[in-house]
Image (cartoon, rainbow, N blue to C red):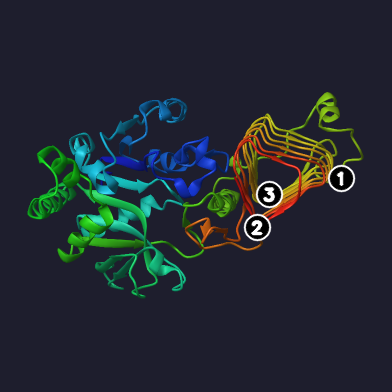
Amino acid sequence: MSNPSLKGIILVGGPSVGTRFRPLSMDCPKPLFPIAGQPMIYHHVSALAKLPGMKEILVVGFFENSVFDRFLTEVQMEYPDVPIRYLREYQALGTGGGLFHFRDQIARGAEQFFVLNADIACSFPLAGMLQTHAKHGGVATLLGMRVDRSVASKFGCVVADPETQEVLHFVEKPESFLSDMISCGIYLFNRGIIDVMRDAIQERQSRLMDEGEGETDDLRGGAERFQLEQDVLSRLTSAKKLYAHICTAGKDFWMQIKTGSSVIPANRMYLQHFLHAAPRKLSNAPRPSMSEIMTATSPVTPHSPQDPTTAYVIQPAYIHPTAVLHPTAKLGPNVSIGPRVLLGRGVRVRDAILLDSVEVKNDSCILNSVVGWDSKIGSWCRVEGAPGESTALNATLKGYKIPSATILGKDVTVADEIAIRNCIVLPHKDIKTSQHNEILM
């Protein structure tokens, strides 16, 4: 059986969303924030581009065109056989409106197309979804995953036939428990989905006219602005045309990336996945020159059993080749080190992301934290997030920081011998006293 012609669509939203991701989204569009050494949506593009029959990948959103220019140029060089383009909506149209607005470009030359939300981390079992889709012959297949029932109602819940995997019920964020299977925001559609979306838009337009909302021009924009989950998937369920491909427990992973602190578990999931699926994506410590070591602070006896001239790295870890690490530094597991990062003598980093040009001076410790671009951490400092992981979809509750990772925005300076625990620090701040459980404006 020949492979169907495919397209991939990545929904990136716009600058008005991602507010829960601050302060990290203040200096970098959320879809391009680096996780496991690559922009967030690079992992989506990589999974799509490797599928046989993939004809084109379209990034759809409401950001300015220039935002993705460099990313698209770089990723196109890595995957030259699959055209990758950005399509900008004329206004924010929701998860379904953008698909319908660009329906002609999406459907042209493709029998089936994947739709992926940008704000997720996933193992992307897309080949398995294709097999499931071919087997049942429905209009749509969604990726489902079983989660703890205590958090299931925070997502779109799915009830599926255990034998055929036909979706019997789909409810977006139900008020009471419905199922421990959730929708992962990854879909595979036939071209017939366009007719279903057209029906949804006509129904919405009729409802807006009955309610007397707006003039004709406003009506068009209001009708085209709709959500795939609420307005389309429920229709497919009623028509018995929606099926589920369920993630394999222990093999596949998935999580939402809503808040800044959620990038820490997302980073860990990708790195742990690469450990067995793509070990070449992981890094050993680069070997610094003696002049670089002297810059990082005076050398002492290295403690690395791997190589006495390099830092000690516990895998999995991603380390950019331009990073300079003192031989006595110790990193990992679950660490991503960005370009031009400088780590001094005796520094310890674990479960953390250090972004471009961060400098950490001697004997400091970074745990469960994100350190923003150009930030500087003094000597004998401790930057630490709260232990464990928060499942909250917001960073704050009633004005207080929910216990989770510590986040330092861009160009934050921390003085010597300072402890920062469970804090969010906005960009361009100088921290001269220890802080705990604070949001520092």
Q: Which residue is mark 2?
A: 437
Q: CA distance from mark 3 to mark 1?
A: 16 Å
The mark closer to the camera, 2 or 1, is: 2
Three-letter amino acid code at the position of disc 2: Asn
Q: Secondary structure at mark 3?
A: loop
Pointer 3 or 2: first along the chain: 3
Mark 2 and mark 1 lie on one chain; the one further toward the N terminus is: 1
Report the residue marked by disc 1: 303
Q: Residue sitting at 13 percent across and 48 percent down?
A: 198
Query: Residue 279 sits in which quadrant?
Result: top right
Residue bearing mark 3 = 315
* Within-10-Å neighbours for mark 3: few <14, some 14–19, many 20+: some
**Camera-side residue: 199 or 57?**
199
Verify CB contact (< 8 Å) between mark 3 and mark 2: no
Q: Alpha-carbon distance for marks 3 and 2? A: 30 Å
**Place of residue 136 in the rendered image (x, y in percent of width and height, measured from the top left):** 23, 61
Mark 1, secondary structure of its residue: loop
